[in-house]
Image (cartoon, rainbow, N blue to C red):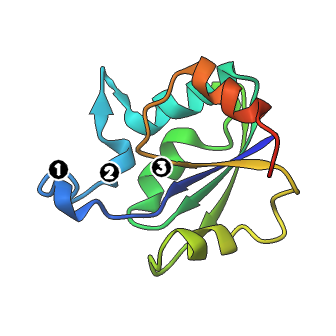
Amino acid sequence: MQCVVLAAGEGKRMRPLTARRPKVMLPIANRPMMEHLVLAARDAGITDFIFVVGYCEREIRNHFGDGSDFGVKIAYVTQRHQLGTADALRATAGLVGDRFLLLNGDMVLKRDDIRELCRKDAP
């Protein structure tokens, strides 16, 4: 299963913390919050990620690279103008298969919860 992680937003409500970095890179327990999400998803069995980046994307790309340091594979797409979730997902057209998990990069989820989401059948 693939996982699309939305990480393009600026996080305006978190200013001044997000003046020079995206909200998903704010630290929680000495790690960017998005790293917690990626590790939980990896531990749930997901190893193929697509990150939708935009605001301060260089920080995300520099931290995660191709994903090999985290035991996953990461591809990136850039959303130049944040026009909502549907537009962010549209940016991944041609990269995602028919079954994937879509997560916001600022979510904090447990491995078991992600595993349970992946087991659900599509309607």
Q: Is residue 108 left or right of residue 87?
A: left
Q: Residues within 10 Å of mark 2 (few under 14, many from 20)?
A: many
Q: Which of 15 and 104 is in front in this view?
A: 104
Question: Which corner quadrant holds the N terminus?
Answer: top right
Residue that badge 2 annotates:
23
State how far apart marks 2 and 3 are (Cα). 10 Å
Q: Which amino acid does label 2 sit on?
A: Lys
- The residue lying furthest to the right in this view is 98
Residue that badge 1 annotates:
17
**Disc 2 + disc 3, Cβ < 8 Å:** no
Q: Residues within 10 Å of mark 1 (few under 14, many from 20)?
A: few
Q: The residue tagged with tag 1: helix, strand or loop?
A: loop
| Figure quadrant of residue 106 | top left
Q: Locate residue 49, reporting x and y percent.
A: 70, 45
Residue at 32% over, 64% down = 10
Q: Which one is closest to the eye, mark 2 or mark 3?
A: 2
- The residue lying furthest to the left in this view is 16
Q: Locate residue 21, reporting x and y percent.
A: 30, 54
Residue at 53% over, 56% down = 6
Q: In this view, does 66 lie to the left or right of 98?
A: left
Sooner in the amino-acid sequence: mark 1 or mark 3: 1
Q: Is residue 37 above or below residue 45?
A: below
**Disc 1 + disc 2, Cβ < 8 Å:** yes
| Figure quadrant of residue 82 | bottom left
State how far apart marks 1 and 2 are (Cα). 8 Å
Q: Which amino acid does label 1 sit on?
A: Leu
Q: Nearer the viewer, residue 119 or 2?
A: 119
Residue 60: which disc? 3
Q: What residue type is labelled 3?
A: Ile
Residue 65: which disc? none
